[in-house]
Image (tube, grey):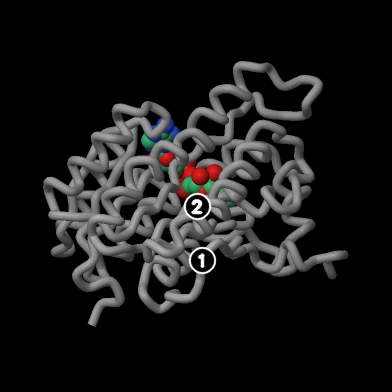
Amino acid sequence: MGRLEGKIALITGAGSGIGRETAILFATHGARVSCVDKNEGANAETVAGIKAAGGDVVAIAADVSVAADAAEMVEATVTRFGGLHIAFNNAGVMLADDGGAVETDESVWDATMDINAKGVFLGCKYEIPAIRDAGGGSIINTASFVAIMGAATPQIAYTASKGAVLAMTRELAIIHARQNIRVNALCPGPLRTELLMKFLDTDEKKRRRLVHLPMGRFGEAAEMAQAALFLASDESSYVTGSDFLVDGGLTAAYVTPE
Ligand code: NAD
């Protein structure tokens, strides 16, 4: 018996990394899944894989930073599947020119905030009424450990955007608690996905990040999907407003043993 039987889920950033792995896992557990990404080719690959495995899934092209797209992704999901119970606002970027405050350009700040912070706000704006109509459900917003710790390799815009996601998530959890809507932030540690590996583009940069990880390795997108599954399912019925850290022990580390 799947852990999401009868549920309808919307996942942004489903074309790659965490979003793709989560879409696959949710479908395996019986959810009908609306896969959203602005990269249509990558999203089509995710959807084809799920369909081939017998899952009920639809691909939706949308840029989460555009209000009309966010409204449309929710409407299309409800039209196709008849409601919405689970929303995973996961799409995000880490731009190559993001760095320290002194050298980071204003345009990098704006672009990062638009997708990572405003994109989550817009998602919630349109998802909440649909989830309320369905009698309640679960929203998961992807933040990051850097929302709590800051990063040792400078990425000021990204860190600030994830702080915004975490703060927004806590408020939403409080405001919508009596509507039977749970809202949690998934806070991954550093992962071996395209987003981070492109950013940490030298061995030295990777080493500087790995030094903070007690497990001595980056996390995997599939490991984040398992956490998202728990937060999405009724198993987490008393969990809301949390900064759900899945970070290989990074935030607990004082000094890392060799
Ligand atoms: P990824 O780059 O593998 O996948 C991100 C997906 O989001 C891509 O398919 C991309 O096309 C899509 N996307 C980007 N901008 C979009 C937009 N405006 N509209 C719609 N789709 C858009 O990245 P990932 O590692 O799977 O990251 C997923 C989330 O996890 C992000 O929010 C990221 O910030 C967060 N995160 C990642 C790490 C890490 O180490 N990789 C750590 C902590 C948090």
Q: Is mark 1 within 8 Å of ligand 1?
A: no
Q: Is residue 240 above or below residue 131?
A: below
Q: 61 or 110: nearer the eye?
A: 110
| Residue 121 relative to residue 4: left or right | right
Q: Is residue 223 above or below residue 102?
A: below
| Cβ at disc 2 under 8 Å from ligand 1 | no
Q: Are marks 2 and 1 in contact (CB under 8 Å)?
A: no
Please give the name of the residue rendered at 78% of the width and 26% of the height, measured from the top-left corner: 101
**Above or below 148: residue 230:** below
Rendered image quadrant of residue 135: bottom left
Query: In the rendering, at what x and y percent does residue 89 appear?
Result: 42, 48
The N terminus - image quarter: bottom left
Residue 235 drawn at (x, y percent): 40, 78
Q: Which residue is mark 1?
A: 240
Please indicate, yes or no, whether residue 258 appears anywhere in the rendered image: no
**Point 63% across, 57% down: residue:** 189
Q: Residues within 10 Å of mark 1 (few under 14, many from 20)?
A: many
Q: Position of residue 134 (x, y in %)?
A: 23, 60
> What is the quadrant of residue 219 in the picture?
bottom right
Q: Using the numbered discs, state the Cα–Cα distance from disc 2 to disc 1 in whole angstroms.
A: 10 Å
| Residue 211 left/right relative to 199 | right
From the top left corner, tell me how far across and down residue 100 is, in percent: 78, 29
The part of the image, by quadrant, that contains residue 108 is top right
- Left or right? Give the position of 90 relative to 6: right
Does residue 257 appear in the picture of this structure? yes
Farthest-out residue, right: 255
Disc 1 marks a residue whose amino acid type is Thr
Residue displayed at 51% across by 66% down: 240
Instruction: Write down the residue under mark 2.
Output: 172
Q: Amino acid at mark 2?
A: Leu
